[in-house]
Image: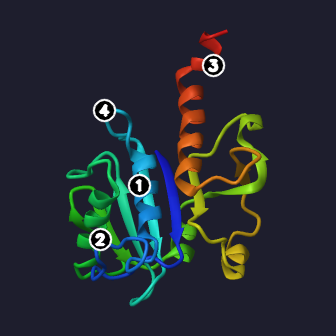
Amino acid sequence: MKRFVVVGHLAATSGTFSLNDLPGSAGRMDILCRCINSSLFLSHDLRRDVECYLILRGAPDPEKTVLFRGSAVRYLSPDERSSAALIKKALSIPCGDEFRESTPGVYVRRGGLSRILSEIPFAVLDEAGEDIRGVPVLPEAYLLSDHQNFTPEDQEMLEGRDRYSVGPLSLHADHTITVLLNEMDRRESGWMSSKR
């Protein structure tokens, strides 16, 4: 199972945001929606072996985590508004400390980064990290941030974790996921060696 966790520093934690203003009223939810799409969509299919976790840190509630599971998700179309509508629905239901399903394949719970780091050994996607093309065996779980850098408190939690980079330039979070999945696809299929 491949897993991505994206920290949304300003992302709304209740379902009161407007689908017509994802960058504003939803706290840059548009970035997180693009990350969902990059994680799950192929040209005419979904990646069934991927989970995408969104850590929402904005107003008005404490941190929440929304999970999209590729093997179970339904009603998801490859546009930001579709992803945002599913997030909005998830945030509109009462949730506790365990994941609760809001629609097929979409889940929500209270809690954020510190909890998920204690559950799954995520590597960090970092521009200064080791080049993924030089890593013999890539991890299957990655953590990355939205348009803002990790906070000093985040960096403290991430101390000692492996850090990887997808290239020499700074990319958007959703593009980083696409590049990384492409590298994994190439390795899993043996595509590189078969073209030589």
The colour scheme is rainbow
Which residue position holds label 1? 36
Q: Is residue 195 left or right of residue 15?
A: right
Which three-letter amino acid code belongs to the residue tagged 4? His
Q: Earlier in the sequence, mark 4 or mark 3?
A: 4
Image quarter of the C terminus: top right
Residue at position x 49%, y 76% in the image:
112
How many residues crowd around disc 4 within 10 Å: few (fewer than 14), some, or many (20 or more)? few
Disc 4 to disc 3, C-alpha distance: 23 Å
Which residue position holds label 3? 192
Which residue position holds label 4? 44
Residue at position x 60%, y 34% in the image:
183
Disc 4 to disc 2, C-alpha distance: 27 Å
Which three-letter amino acid code belongs to the residue tagged 1? Ile
Which residue position holds label 2? 20
Residue at position x 37%, y 71% in the image:
22
